[in-house]
Amino acid sequence: MLGQGACSRYDFNMKTTPTMAIAREIKKIAESISSTLIAIRRDLHQHPEIGFQEHRTCRKITEQLKRIGLNAIRSPVAKTGVVGLLKGGQKGNNTVALRADIDALPIEEVNPIIPYKSLNAGVMHACGHDGHVAMVLGAAMILKYLQARIPGTVKFLFQPGEEGYGGAGSMIRDGALRNPQVDAIFGLHVSVDQNYGVLGISPGPIMAAADRFQARIIGHGGHGAHPELCTDPLLAANHIYQGFQSIERNLNGRDARIISICSLHGGTAFNIIPDTAELLGTVRTLNAKVQATILRRMRQVVRGVEIMHGVRCEFRYFKEYPVTSNNAAMATLAREAAADLQMPVRPMIGSMGAEDFSMYQKLVPGVFINLGIRKNSRQPGLHNNRFTFDDRVLAIGAAFMTRCALLYLEKSSPPKK
């Protein structure tokens, strides 16, 4: 029996606020569709497709959106993408987008512990994109149920070709952010750096700009026994390699940057000096000034090697993905959404990896969030041929994305009179 005064610890007359009520409803619906989301994710996992080849994935997403009953669906967009639209039942002029990437990786799955292993040889969902699709479809299911309460419009972007194909740019060029114009965007990625169910949310730069470079060295080949008669492109390539690596040592130690030469090709035999050699690599930065400094010094290194070795160098530099940088107000809103759902939040663990979600952020305020899937130290990492995760987390992600969309529209809609 409770002693006298024990009830003072509890307020049985405390009223449930509208925020508490909607949060409870979102979580309840998310739990009720958990098995559906798991089935969707596992089906996609069994049938992975490379960027801009996601034809079956596109059909399956479209079928699900039709089953949900969205107002309008565009399919395909940007070759194999899908855009779904849900107009709310309350007055509101703003449109918020939820984005999921849908492509897989050219990896042969060797995971022996799951019954839904990839059926496509040499292709695997090793980065969680199958889960991202299921989460955003889950958000569409929940928001459809809550449609009468939505003050505005929600767009669901299912984007192909994130893994190095620039799919976000293709979606943008094909009008994914228009008709109606998107005012804000949310993206989410599963993370092995965060514990299971923990959200990583931070403002500002969280992932690096990703650039690509190519240096082709043209010399004059000949017999390996007579290098004096040749202009050796391999020797020149070696000095370019060392010169590029030395750039990092001459930058401010606090400036995040990576220069990685990942491919060096030249020659066909042990006793033939080739005519050409080629270097391929990537530059990762978080700061535009550092990026510009690296590019200037790389060109200086190439010119110096040309003069020193008498070779000709064709140097090409491609700026591909910009820095993924979270809008501060949007990051605050995402944290508030997590608090409404009583989900744990930690600062996002930054990465020198890249995300083409950054291309949307160049045009509209956006926030990119990590959702932890790590349960123990044996959790396989992203892009690993044994990658998998506990897919009960899908309902958590769907609920969170739902609350983010709804909260943004609530805050941006005109006040009720």
Image (spheres, rainbow, N blue to C red):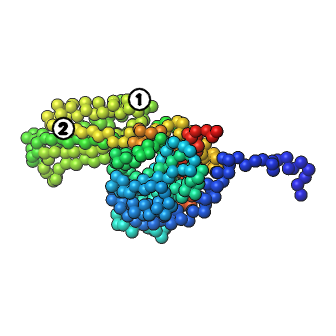
Identified by mark 2, the residue type is Cys
| Quarter occupied by the N terminus | bottom right
Comparing 53 with 140, the one in front is: 140
* Residue furthest front as drawn: 417
Residue under pointer 1: 252
Q: Is residue 163 visible?
A: no
Q: CA distance from mark 1 to mark 2?
A: 28 Å
Locate residue 393, reporting x and y percent.
Answer: 56, 57
What is the quadrant of residue 45 in the picture?
A: bottom left
Residue 307 seen in render: yes
Q: Residue at x 57, y 62 (%)?
A: 34
Callout 2: helix, strand or loop?
Answer: strand
Residue 51 at x, y percent in the picture = 35, 55
Which disc is residue 106 wearing?
none
* Of 272 and 202, the residue lying toward us: 202
Where the C terminus falls, by quadrant? top right
Residue toward you, 75 or 61: 75
Residue type marked 1: Asn
- In this rendering, is residue 42 above or below 247? below
The quadrant in which residue 145 appears is bottom right
Q: Position of residue 67 (x, y in %)?
A: 49, 64
Looking at marks 1 and 2 on the same chain, the residue that comes earlier in the sequence is marked by: 1
Q: Residue furthest bottom?
A: 115
Give the class, few, some or many, for how many residues have Cα within 10 Å of label 1's Cα (few <14, many ≥20): few
Q: Residue at horizontal 53%, vertical 55%?
A: 139
Residue at left offset 35%, top offset 48%: 174
**Mark 2 highlights which residue?**
313
Left or right of residue 164, residue 29 in this image: right
Please report the residue visible at 53 percent of the width from the left and 65 percent of the height from the top. Answer: 36
Q: How many marks?
A: 2
